[in-house]
Amino acid sequence: MYRYDEFDAALVRERIAEFSDQVDRRSSGALTEDEFKPLRLMNGVYLQLHAYMLRVAVPYGVISSRQMRRLAHVARTYDKGYGHFTTRTNIQFNWPALQDLPAILSDLAEVEMHAIQTSGNCIRNVTTDVFAGVAADEIEDPRPWCEIVRQWSTIHPEFSFLPRKFKIAIVGAPKDRAAVRTHDVGLQIVRGEDGQTAFRVFVGGGQGRLPHIAQEIAPAVPGQSLLAYLTAILRAYNLLGRRDNIHKARIKILVAAIGIDAFRDEVERQFAILRQEDLRIPDEELARIQAYFTPPPFADLPATSPAYDAARRLNPEFARFTRSNLREHKQAGYGAVIVSLKPIGGVPGDITAAQMDVVADLAARFSFHEVRASYEQNLVLPHVRLEDVHAVWSRLREAGLATANADLATDIIACPGLDYCSLANARSIPVAQALSHQLADAALLEKLGPVRINISGCINACGHHHVGHIGVLGVDRKGEEYYQITVGGSPDEQAALGEIVGRSLPAEEVAPAIARALDRYLEIRNDGELFIDTVRRLGADPFRTAIYELTDAAA
Amino acid sequence: MQLLEQVQDGVRLSVSTPEEDVRAAATANDSLILEFEAFRDGRGFSLAAVLRGLGYRGRLIAAGKVLPDQARHLRRCGFDAVELSPGADPAPWRRMDQVFSAAYQPASGDDRLVWRQRHTNPDAALAARLNAQWGQAAAEDLLRAVLDPALERKAAVISSFGAEAAVLLHLISRVRPDLPVVFLETGQHFFQTLAYRRELTERLGLTDVRDIKPEAAALSKADPRGDLWRSAPDACCTIRKVQPLAQALAGFDTRITGRKRYQNSHRAALEPFEAADGVLTVNPLAAWSADQTETWLRDHQLPRHPLVEQGYPSIGCWPCTRAVETGENARDGRWAGQEKTECGIHERALAPAC
Ligand code: HEM
Ligand code: SF4
Ligand code: SF4
C-alpha cells in the first residue's frame, strides 16, 4: 500500500497547523461561523444532532494494521469506543469533543491518516474496488491511479470551492464493485487502442433528491491525460454549475440540464485550452506510485489446501461462512475474507475499538498487514492463505465479526438516520435491525442469494437506497416516520435507479413487507436466477403486490 | 502575493461574468480586477486559471469577499494581488499564504511541486519508499521486495563469511540462491574462514560466490612482506578490501549487507535501505538483536564459524582480530587497541566485510 514520503507527511502536518489557525481565528471572532463552516467541513468536522462528528478518510479503502490500531485508539480515547464505516470507505467518529480534534488529527497524522476533504464542496476521498489487486478479472490495479488522483485533488487551489461536493470512484475491472456510475465522475480502466492504460469516463451520477446514473463522456482517455481531462471536467463544472440552489448544484444537474453532448463539448473546449503538458503524470512518478502496489510477497502455494477442505467438511458453520464471505484471489492458494460489520440486529458499519484491534491483529498475522474497507460498509482481509481461513474465522467469530452474510439480504447498507443526523426524516438503524432479525435465518439467507438492501433516513440518500435492489427511504408523514420502498435499483455496471412501489409504510411494517417480497421472489424465480435478475425480467409488479398484500387485505 | 490596502482602479468584473466576456476583457486590458461576490463562489479561481492557461501576462487582482484562507488558492491560480477589504488584518493573509511548503498539483507559475522535488534523487526516493513500506517487515520479505524483478536492480551480496554471516546467506539462499555473493579474499584470512566459506556455500546451495582478491601488482608494491597491517592498517585495508571491492561491485547498483545496528555505535541509526553515490544499500538485518541472530542460527541449524567457539564473536583478517573477554563488546576484538572501528569500506556505506 502507499506510504507517505516526507512531502506527504509535511502536507498533512501543515494542514493541521492551518486548521488550528482557523480554529483560533474562529474563537477570537476573526472568522464568522459562516466563514468557518466550510473550512471545518473540509477537515471532516460535521455538526450532527447531538455532537460534532469527525469523518476520517481511508483513501480508496486501504488500511494497514497500524492504522487500524490507531483508529481503535481514537475510538477508545476520544469517543465512546466505536466508529462507523461509510459507503465511501471513510470512518466516522460520532462523539469527539471539539477541543480534542487537534490531538485526534495529530494522532492520525502519525500513522499517515487525515480527515482532509472528507466533507465540503471539494473533491472527496477517491473510492475503488475493495478487491483491487485481488480480483482475477482486473485489467489493471486501480489503486495507483486512485493515489495519483488523491494527491492531485488534495488541497487543490482551483477546486476547493466548487458549487457542491465532488466524488470520484475508479475501478480496474469491467465488473463494477465500486458503484462508479453513482459518482460525479466514475472511471473504469480500459485498454486504449495503443494497448496502454486508458479510462472510460462517466460523468453526472449522484444520488440525493434528484438521483442520476452517470453517462459516458469519453470511451478511452489515455492515462497520461487523465489529470488534464479531470481538470477540464471540474473547470467546466466550476464555471457553469448552479450556485443558486443547493439541491441543484451537483454536476448531475448541470449534465442533465445541458445534455451530455453539450457538456462533452464544453469539457473538450476546456481540455483544448489548458496546459496539458503540465498535468501529464511523469513516467517516473507513475512508476514510483505503482511500486507501492506491487503484490505482497505471496508464497507459491497449490490452488487447494487439504486443511481448508477438511475444515469445511467437518464444520458446517465454517463451510457456510466460506460460501458467503470468502472471495477468490488471483494468487493460487489465497482468498479474500469479508469481515461482516452486519451482525444480526447490529448497526450496519459500526465497529468497536476491541473489534478494530482484532481485525488489525488478524491482518498483521494473516494478510500482510492489510485491511480494506468496502462500499458495502464491511471490511476485507484481502490476502489470506486458504489454510489460514479457519483460524481467521474462529477469531472473527469470537469477536462477533463472522456473520455469514456478505452480499446477502442482511448485509444491509444504512445511513445513520435520525439517531445521529440532523437532516434525517426518520431513523434508519432500527429499521435495519428489525429487517436483520426478520431475515436472520442462515439457511433462508443462503437460499435467497445475493440481495442488496439499502436504507436512507432522508432523500439525501447517504444509504444509497436509490440503487439498492430493494431500497428503503425515510420520509416524514405529518411528523411521523414512514418509509418508502423501491425495487430494482442496482449500483454496478448495469446501474439503475429503483422504482418506487407505492405509498410509504410505518416502521414496523417495513421488515415484514420486504420479507414477503423476498418470499415472492423464491416462488417466481427461474432456476439459479438472482433476485435482481428476476426483477429485471418481471418488473416491480409482483413485488409490489407482495409488499402491500397484507395492508391491502386489511384496508 | 501582494496585499493591497487601497481600492484599485481598473477594469472590474464580477466572477459571475461569463468566461468569454472575461477573456475578451483580458485581451483588451493589461490588468483585471475580479470581484468575488461570496467566498464560497469559486468561479474566480477557474477564471484566473483559464486566463493564465491561455498565456495572459497582465496583472490579475482579486477583490470582494475572499478569506485569508484562500490566499494560496488565489496565488496558485494566477492572481498577483488581492485587494483587502477596508480595515482587514494582513497578518493572517501572510500566514495562510505560506502554510504549505509544497503542492501536489501543477498550477500557474509554481515551482514547489512535489512531483518535481521527488525525482531529483531517484535512489533516495526509492530508499525512502522501501523504508516506509518494508522497514518493519521481516528480513526475508524485505529482500523479496528489493529483489522484485520489476525494480530491475542489479544486486550483489557482500559477505565476510564471519561469525554471523550465515543468517544473511541463509535468507539469500531462500530468496535467490543464484545472487552474486562477494567474498573479500584479503589473503589474510584465518584458514578456518576459508573452510567455512566452502562449507556454508555448499550447505546453502549458493551458486555464485565470488572470491575477490587484491591486485597482485599493487600488493607486491605496497605490501611485499604482507605486514602492512602492522604499520598502516588503513592502507592495508585499502589495497586488500576497499579497492578490490570497488572493482568487484562495479556494475551493481544494489548491495546487500548483513550490518546490524547493535554491532557498534556508528551503526546505531542504520536503516534497512540507504542510498548514496548512486547505489542502494540494503541491510535486511539492521534491526536484528544479537539474541535474534543466535536464535535464528540455532533454529535453522546453520553451521557456525569454527572460531566462534573459541571466543571470536566478530571475525575479520587474522592479524586484526582477537578473541574478546566476557563483558566486552563483540567488535572490541577488531583492531584492538586502535581507534579504527571500521575498515574504511563502510564510510561509503558499502560493506560489512571487516
Ligand atoms: C451523519 C452525518 C451525515 C450528514 C449530515 C450527511 C449529509 C449528506 C447530504 C446533505 C447528502 C446529499 C448531498 C447532495 O446530494 O448534494 C449526502 C449524501 C450522501 N452521503 Fe451523507 N451524510 C451523513 C452521513 C453519511 C454516512 C454515514 C454515509 C455512508 C454510509 C454517507 C454517505 C453519503 C453518500 C454515499 C451520499 C450520496 C452521494 C451522492 O449523492 O452521490 N453520509 N449526505
Ligand atoms: S440520508 Fe439523510 S438521514 Fe441519512 S445520513 Fe444522509 S442526510 Fe442523514
Ligand atoms: S583487516 Fe587488517 S589485515 Fe585485513 S585488510 Fe584490513 S588492515 Fe589489512
Image (spheres, coloured by chain):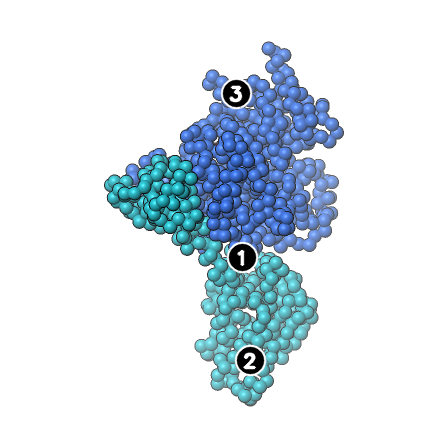
Q: CA distance from mark 3 to mark 1?
A: 55 Å
Residue beneath the point at 61% across and 58% down: B150
Residue type pointed to by label 3: Tyr
In which quadrant of the rendered image does the C terminus of chain A lie?
top right
Q: Quadrant of residue A186?
A: top right
Whole-percent x, y for residue A169 in the image = 55, 41
Q: Residue at label 3?
A: A482
Q: Colour of chain B?
A: cyan
- Of badges 3 and 1, nearer the viewer stands 1
Q: Is mark 2 within 8 Å of ligand 3?
A: yes
Chain under callout 3: A
Marked residue nearer the N-terminal end (3 or 1)? 1
Q: Quadrant of residue A471?
A: top right
Q: Residue at label 1?
A: A284
Label at residue B101: none
Instruction: Give the vertical position of B94 relative to A442 (above or below).
Output: below
Q: Colour of chain A?
A: blue
